[in-house]
Amino acid sequence: MVGKTSIFLKYLSRELINPINYLISLMIGAAINAAQGHNIFFSAVPFIIPLFVQTLSKASIRYKHKDLEILCVLPGERKDPAFVMDWDGSIIASEGNTKEFFRNHKIEKIHQLFTKPEAETILEMAKKSKNNPETEPLELFSEFAHKWYQIQIKLGADSRYILIWLDEISSRKALDASLSEIRHFSNEVITSIHDLVIINDIYDRLARLIIREGYRGIFITREDQEGNLAGYVFKGKPDELLKSDLIKISKDSSAPIWDSHRAQCDSYGCVVSTTKEEAATQEDFEKAHPFDERVKAFLGFPITS
């Protein structure tokens, strides 16, 4: 009970310091005094009563809907934009992070966030949702934000405005693209197994796949009959791949390419990875992970992972 009273008093105090309530009470009090044929400041009662009625009624309403008020804060806390727009694509309401994002970038219409054709697609989807509320979400890329978004739409009261939720799916899109590349690589290997035996370019194809994923260089090896590693370093672009001469890494070497063998996480071994961020300087990183000089020379740029 004490907790509820303190909450109500908090809302009441907010209304008591709200200048709008005093301005309205002033206008009402002046009108009542004037209507009675007196000076507008003849009596204080016409001013005091409206003030207390306003503050108590507004505080009571806010207290009654306090949970709803908290819920209304949630859309404003979203990292991804959520807003209301009209049928011209103008943004008419936004809060919190979305409002700040739009204000900082002077975004007033959906056409500024997406290209005009994509914005028209969103509006067309909104029109279709009038007859089919269960319309599937759109997936569009925003050139402005450089992000992929899943777009969900719901019409407001009387279909006079459109509610828009954007959920960033850039990571998922990147993963989908990576999986697509891997499937393509697997299919290519399976369908051209005869050529692989003749040309023996499986390393080249695998290197292209990995570099296409954003890596600058890759060293691919396998164990030879003596237990050493032998393989090639690749760098460049997938269509302009440069390949080193055969490089052999002694089984007694401390080169980091042996780290996964030495780790012995389980009976199948494990993958070991590390990055420069774990060391103070590039020199410290290379000292902790002594890369083969031939690999470093061929790549021609600092190895950071």
Image: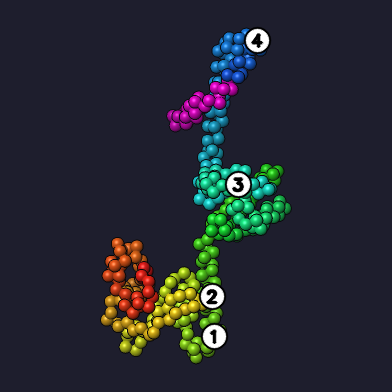
Instruction: Give the overall secondary structure of the magenta segment.
Output: helix
- The answer to whether residue 1 of the structure is visible from this angle is no
As shown in the figure, which amino acid type bears the numbered disc 1? Ser
Instruction: Name the disc covering residue 192, or none.
Output: 1
As shown in the figure, which amino acid type bears the numbered disc 4? Gln
Query: If the image is split into quadrants, where does the C terminus sit?
Result: bottom left
Q: Does 214 sit above or below residue 48?
A: below
Q: Which numbered mark, 2 or 4, is in the foreground of this view?
A: 4
| Dot 4 or dot 3, earlier in sequence | 4
Residue 3 position, x and y percent, is 44, 32
The residue positioned 53% from the left and 89% from the top of the image is 194
In the structure shown, which secondary structural element does the residue marked by tag 4 occupy?
Answer: loop
Q: Which residues are magenta?
A: 1-25
Question: Circle 4 sits on which residue?
Answer: 36
In the structure shown, which secondary structural element does the residue marked by tag 1 occupy?
Answer: loop
Could you give the CA–CA distance between mark 1 and mark 3, rounded to whole angstroms?
A: 53 Å
Label 1 Cα crowd, 10 Å radius (few <14 / some 14-19 / many 20+): few
Label 3 Cα crowd, 10 Å radius (few <14 / some 14-19 / many 20+): some
Question: Circle 2 sits on which residue?
Answer: 183
In the structure shown, which secondary structural element does the residue marked by tag 3 occupy?
Answer: loop
As shown in the figure, which amino acid type bears the numbered disc 3? Glu
Quadrant hosting residue 161: top right
Question: Circle 3 sits on which residue?
Answer: 108
